[in-house]
Amino acid sequence: MKRNILGTAILSMAMIAGTTAEADLVSRTKGQEINSPFMRVYERSLPPIGHVLFCKQFPTECKSSGPKRAQVELNHDRKSDLRTVNALVNRLVRPVSDMELYGRIEHWTYPDGEGDCEDYVLLKQRLLINRGWPASALLITVVRDEKDEGHAVLTVRTSKGDYLLDNKRAEIMTWNESPYTFIKRQSDRDPQVWVSLTLPNAKRAAKQTADTGANQRMHQ
């Protein structure tokens, strides 16, 4: 596994300050209550093939650890953690598609200076775990972006709601400040289980995008 960028990120943590920006955006997801600070989850969903293969290659990275269904108290220091990690990884990693890097549509891994959206997410998740955040509060999430393309962000479960860490934005934001259509995310009970974020009757419309790794190009 490539770890150089992970080591660089850990060493750089204290040197990075998050920037501040406000998003004036709303979610388009059917079945989500825009005024709720937390996303609503539905039944189990198929995991992205990229995550399945990542877990097969690195099984220790996908084991359950710590409390299940954790929700972190969002104080000043914790929010600073999120801003710092998000800004740091966004700055250290250059966006490059899996096809350019590996010659395949989908390959999830820790980035070594380059990667696409899910690689950013994996690194942010690992850095926050290293800083003491419970894994069950850090959930990889698949969405459709403003261009209706597949994209991945990190959902952070906090006492004040679900926050997103996104490689396309320096500032963290609440889920309902984003412009995204939410498709699925990791379960907060088991990191290898995924759950739907759309109403069951909306799944037919999302069928072509539910498995972002198998047939769709993930947004860089």
Image (cartoon, rainbow, N blue to C red):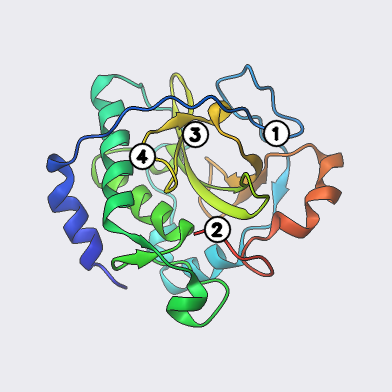
Upstream in sequence: badge 3 or badge 1: 1
Secondary structure beneath dot 3 equals: loop
Q: Is residue 5 visible?
A: yes
Write down the quadrant of residue 165 in the picture.
top left
Q: Amino acid at mark 2?
A: His
Give the alpha-carbon distance from disc 2 to disc 3, as whole Å: 28 Å
Q: Decide: marks 3, 1 in contact (CB < 8 A)?
A: no
Q: What label does residue 219 carry, if any? A: 2
Give the alpha-carbon distance from disc 1 to disc 2, as whole Å: 18 Å
Q: Is residue 36 left or right of residue 110?
A: right
Q: What label does residue 28 carry, if any? A: 1
- Of badges 3 and 1, nearer the viewer stands 1
Give the residue pinned by disc 4.
170
Upstream in sequence: badge 3 or badge 4: 3
- Of badges 3 and 4, nearer the viewer stands 4
Residue in view at x 29 percent, y 66 percent: 113
Task: Count neighbours of disc 4 (C-alpha within 10 A) and say few if under 14, some if 14 to 19, many if 20 or more.
Answer: many
